[in-house]
Each structure stands twice: as C-alpha cells, then as structure tokens.
Amino acid sequence: MSTVDTRVALWVDIAAEMLSAPLTEFPVEVIGRGLIDSFEADYAAISWRHVDGRSGLRSVTRPGAAHGGHSAPDATALAVTAVTSPLLDHHPLVRWFIATDSGAPQSMRRVPEAVRSDRSADAIDLLHLIGSDQELSIPLHLQGVSHHVVVVGRAGSADFSNDDMAVARRLQPLLLAVHRQVHVLGLALPGVRPPGSALLGAGAGAGAGAGAAAGLPESRPSDLGLSGRELAVLQLLASGRTAGAIGWALGCSGRTVQKHLEHVYRKLGVRDRVNAVRVGREAGLIRMSAPPSGPEASGPRALLRP
C-alpha cells in the first residue's frame, strides 16, 4: 500500500463514524485534529464567507506549535481578523479559486504570481506573522465569493508535497460528504447541538472538546435508531426528492440511497416513503417545510461533487 493510500485509509473509519452520528454542526475538533496529524500541520481550520459578506473561521491548533511566537488564542484572533477583513480578497488561494473556477485542493505556494494581487504580499506577511507560511485549502462549497473551505497551515519554506496534494484530493469527497450531511441535518433538527460538536459560522477559536472516544455524539433516543446518514436521507425524502437527487445532495449513488431507505423503512416499521415521512414528522425528525435553498441546491459549481 502506498504512503498516500495508508494516510487516506486512516480517514475511512473516522468518516464513517461522522456520517453515522446525527451531527447538525461541522465537527471541527475531530476533523481538525485528524488533518493536523495527516499533514504534519500546525493548525487546521474551516473558513467561510457567505454571500452577504459575513465571514469567520474556527480552528484547531497543534499542541506546542510556535505560531510565530504568539499564543494559540492570539494567533487565532489574528487569523479571524484576516478572514473578516478586506484583506481576505487578496489571499492567494481566494484569488485562485475565484479566477480558475476550480474546486480542486490547492496550496498557496502553487498559486501563480499572475493570479495574485498587489496586496497578496500583505496577506502572506500576516500569515507569516502567525507562523502559517504554507497553506493548503480543500474547498467544500464555492459560489462566487461565497465559500466554505478546510485549510491546513504550517510554518517553514517547504510547500506541501505532491503526496500531500494527492491525499487532499482523496480526502475531499469524505469531508464534503460530512459537510453536506451536516447542512441537511442542521435544517432537519434545528436547535439540536450534539455534545462535542463545534459551531460552524458563529465565532472563532478551537473547536469544542471531543465527546466519547472519537469526539462524536451518541445517537439520541428520539432518533428512533436512525443513523445520521439515514436521518439526512429521510429529511431529503420528505422534500419530495428522488433517490438520484438525494444521492446528488449527499454525494453518494442512488443505489446507496436505496439501501439507506431500506434501513429507514425497517427501523420505522413502514413499507413506503409516505409512511416513513409521516412517522418521521410525528417524531420531530423532519422539518414541516422543505429545506430552503442552500449549497446543496445551488448547482455543480456551488456544490462540489466528488
């Protein structure tokens, strides 16, 4: 097994557990720690900007990282200042994704000078100030200036290697599947915050403490025994989508969706979608109205398909 295969294999069980859990918020802590280990990074973060201009960042840092001489909280505060300021538009990676319309992972060192602006050097200097000389970004959602991206960073002059880039490309579908499912369940189960999860889009800093052995919440009695994946399928089923459309939204095949539906029907004691939706609504597992439009409904550019 190649080095890339070995590194990616470590994520299979992690991803499977995240998809089984009823997560309604992106598990920054669990994913961040895994990315720091996988890429020997000093920090990992999810950074976002919405179409209305709101932006933010949540990060996890490696214990003992220098952070350019700053404490981890101070370095995080500086990073948040950067992503919430006009300087974000000059970050080489932001300019790369907007200019190329590419959803593939990219490292900052690989962005050509022609794509950078006259203020990109200022953005790079700020990153150097907090000990993040090299950054690798894995997009989860891109639509114009709006984005959700996972970022790993580390100090030093060495760019992320070709193997690192290959690992990032292999991890992207797994992270994207979690991101899509969290979005769906966040709409289906409003107000539910599983212990050990970290809030996406409302603040900055390290993720919340991990729960249980893997930092993920256990199933709640009200889930009626459904896994996180099955809950997401049920919610999308209630919106009237076909198996193929549900697969598109969750990043899996229509055939896989059919298998999930078989499990849903069995656990709910029903035989068809109408009764599955009825039982799900009676149990409070489904929104009474269809999910509003969002990344999952915005087309192939906005929703990066693995």
Image: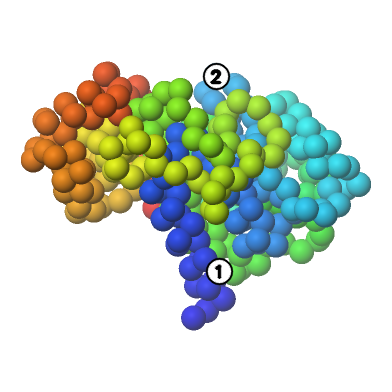
Q: Is residue 298 above or below residue 136?
A: above
Residue 29: x %, y % from top left: 61, 45
> What amino acid does circle 1 point to?
Arg
Residue sitting nearer the eye, 108 or 43: 43
- Residue to which mark 2 is pinned: 52
Task: Locate residue 203 relative to residue 230 in the image: left or right.
Answer: right
Residue at 80 percent across and 34 percent down: it is 78
Q: Is residue 165 above or below residue 97?
A: below
Where residue 227 sits, quadrant-wise, is: top left
Mark 1 or 2: in front is: 1
Q: Secondary structure at mark 2?
A: loop
Q: Is residue 15 above or below residue 297?
A: below
> What amino acid does circle 2 point to?
Asp
Where residue 229 sits, quadrant-wise, is: top left
Residue 79: x %, y % from top left: 75, 36
Q: Is residue 246 above or below residue 174?
A: above
Residue at 45 percent across and 62 percent down: it is 12
- Residue to which mark 1 is pinned: 7
